Image (cartoon, rainbow, N blue to C red):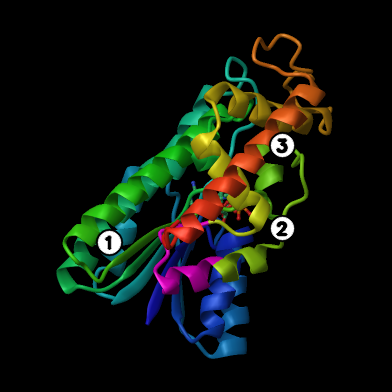
Amino acid sequence: MIALITGASSGLGRSFAKILAKRGFDLVLVARRRPRLVELKKELTAEYGVRVKVLPHDLSKTEECIALFEETEQARIDILINNAGFGVFGKFTETDLERELEMIDVNIKAVHILTKLFLQKFVKRGHGYILNTASLAGFMAGPWFSSYYASKNYVLQLTKAIYEELRAEKSNVYIGAFCPGPVKTEFNDVAGAEFAVEGIDEMEAAEYAIDKMFDGQLIIVPKIYAKLTAAAAKIAPSKLMLAATAKVQSSRVRREPEMPVPVNTGADMKLRLSDEELDSALAGMFDDIKEINEINDKNGGNKNE
Ligand code: NAP
């Protein structure tokens, strides 16, 4: 069994590689930083005796995504993990357009291309797993992190739609979306912002995702607070969710004074609620969620979400 992991030079991708190697999978590791991939290959072959192929690619480039597929076409890839990605933090009018377009190329276009090419192959042979790393951000809009959140919405919605097409034709091929909240990786360094809340351990998050993928779960959200946030995003009024997300993201800026984005207290935001208003609104929302969960439980629940 072979797993191909993009973004394997760091963070969640490196953790996916370690977990799957431990479970006996041979690996294809993809990212731009070749030395890191080679170092990981050495570690995993020595520790677990698996075969590891290193394929450095810049996935922001269409031709490199297609080259990656062609280079692995003869190998029997069983699992594709579309994990490479990054964020661009800041106010939309001030963030760098080039950097954002590169982000859209990696977070959206590369995921789209690789999902399509590998899925066509998997469907033909009737077997395979595709796990797309989206994010909790995929459930909502993200002021001060707007294009990153929007990119993860694309990944989540695309994955859900394909899941349904596969289910309708009773395919054995799996597709699912991994949607973690903050995870301790190099993500912040690249995005240029600190998390407003503490991130969870990358190995723990990745192991959870792998287990749920093999269970066939469509949307994989580790940790109860993240599940509640995802549920809240589905039912809360848009303006309330925007205010809550803005509060979290604007507090990121305050922790990172060297950010080129001005420290924003949100005073210019018409949507902004006072802390007390927000706390009481959120408390009410969680009561609603509890009630909905109880009704769902009584009705047998929705296994896939
Ligand atoms: P990370 O430690 O910064 O890892 C990002 C990975 O993406 C690196 O391996 C990087 O490799 C690769 N990558 C970036 N641009 C690339 C490009 N142009 N071509 C090929 N590979 C590229 O961050 P992470 O947290 O593990 O992020 C992994 C995924 O999780 C991302 O999709 C991210 O959006 C998602 N996520 C992260 C969090 C979080 O809080 N950390 C939460 C939710 C979702 P090279 O630089 O070597 O190319």
Q: Is residue 138 at all visible to an observer of this figure?
A: yes
- Tell me which amino acid carries mark 2: Ile
The quadrant of the image that shows the N terminus is: bottom left
Residue 72 position within the rendered picture, expressed as x and y whole percent measured from the top left: 31, 68
Q: What stretch is highlighted in magenta?
A: 209-220
The answer for how far apart the CA atoms under marks 2 and 1 are is 30 Å
Residue 3 position within the rendered picture, expressed as x and y whole percent measured from the top left: 41, 73
Pointer 2 residue? 200
Pointer 1 residue? 118
Pointer 3 residue? 283
Q: Choose mark 2 or mark 1, whichever is in front.
A: 2
- Between residue 64 and residue 242, name the one nearer to us: 242
- Tell me which amino acid carries mark 1: Phe
Going from N to C along the chain, the mark reached first, 2 or 3, is 2
User: Element type at marker 2?
Assistant: loop
Specify whether residue 253 is painted magenta. no
Residue 2 position within the rendered picture, expressed as x and y whole percent measured from the top left: 38, 78
Q: Choose mark 2 or mark 3, whichever is in front.
A: 3
User: Element type at marker 1?
Assistant: helix
